[in-house]
């Protein structure tokens, strides 16, 4: 899995999470603006968490499990992201900081190549 699309809980496109290759337990990932991102979503709470100040590459863990993969990392503002992909290349994401959290849907448009 090299790219995962993140959407808001309402299903609006938010970001693409690019993952480095090869598939190792420790990979690098970066958020890219989704081409269908609207200004309303960019200015939303989710948008401000995913795109805080500048594009940054994050070290992320990548764990394969039966039927999917789990990706986790912390951004430069301390938000902990967890992406859980399942069968059918669909899943969910969650970002949390202390008692605050946001979440949404996720999918991998190119699937899992392995």
Image (spheres, rainbow, N blue to C red):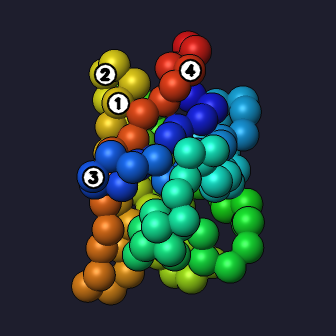
Looking at the rendered structure, the secondary structure element under dot 3 is loop
Looking at the rendered structure, the secondary structure element under dot 1 is strand
* Looking at the image, residue 66 lies above or below residue 39: above
Classify 10 Å Cα crowding around label 2: few (below 14), some (14-19), many (20 and above). few
Please state, as top left, top right, bottom left or bottom right, where the C terminus lies in the image: top right
* Residue 101 shown left or right of residue 38 in the figure: left
Image location (x, y in percent) of residue 44: 43, 73
Q: Residue at x 46, y 47 (%)?
A: 13
The reply to whether callout 2 and callout 1 are in contact (CB within 8 Å) is yes
Q: Is residue 78 in view?
A: yes
Q: Which residue is drawn at 58% across and 15% down?
A: 113
Please state, as top left, top right, bottom left or bottom right, where the N terminus lies in the image: top right
Q: Which mark is residue 110?
A: 4
Q: Label 2: which residue?
A: 87
Q: Nearer the viewer, mark 4 or mark 3?
A: 3
How far is mark 4 from mark 1, CA to CA? 11 Å
Q: Label 3: which residue?
A: 10
* Looking at the image, residue 67 lies above or below residue 40: above
Q: Label 1: which residue?
A: 90
Question: Quick one: 42 or 103, which is closer to the camera?
Answer: 42
How far is mark 3 from mark 2, CA to CA? 21 Å
Question: Quick one: 25 or 37, which is closer to the camera?
Answer: 37
How far is mark 2 from mark 4, CA to CA? 13 Å
* Looking at the image, residue 2 lies above or below residue 34: above
Classify 10 Å Cα crowding around label 1: few (below 14), some (14-19), many (20 and above). some
Image location (x, y in percent) of residue 76: 63, 78
């Amino acid at each position: 899995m090299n790219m995962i699309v993140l959407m808001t809980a309402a299903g609006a496109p938010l970001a693409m999470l690019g993952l480095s290759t090869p598939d190792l337990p420790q990979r690098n990932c970066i958020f890219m603006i989704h081409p269908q991102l609207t200004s309303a979503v960019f200015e939303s709470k989710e948008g401000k968490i995913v795109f805080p100040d500048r594009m940054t590459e994050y070290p992320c863990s990548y764990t394969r499990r039966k039927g999917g993969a789990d990706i986790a990392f912390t951004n430069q503002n301390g938000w902990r992201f967890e992406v859980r992909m399942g069968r059918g290349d669909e899943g969910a994401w969650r970002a949390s900081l202390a008692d605050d959290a946001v979440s949404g849907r996720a999918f991998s448009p190119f699937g899992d190549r392995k």
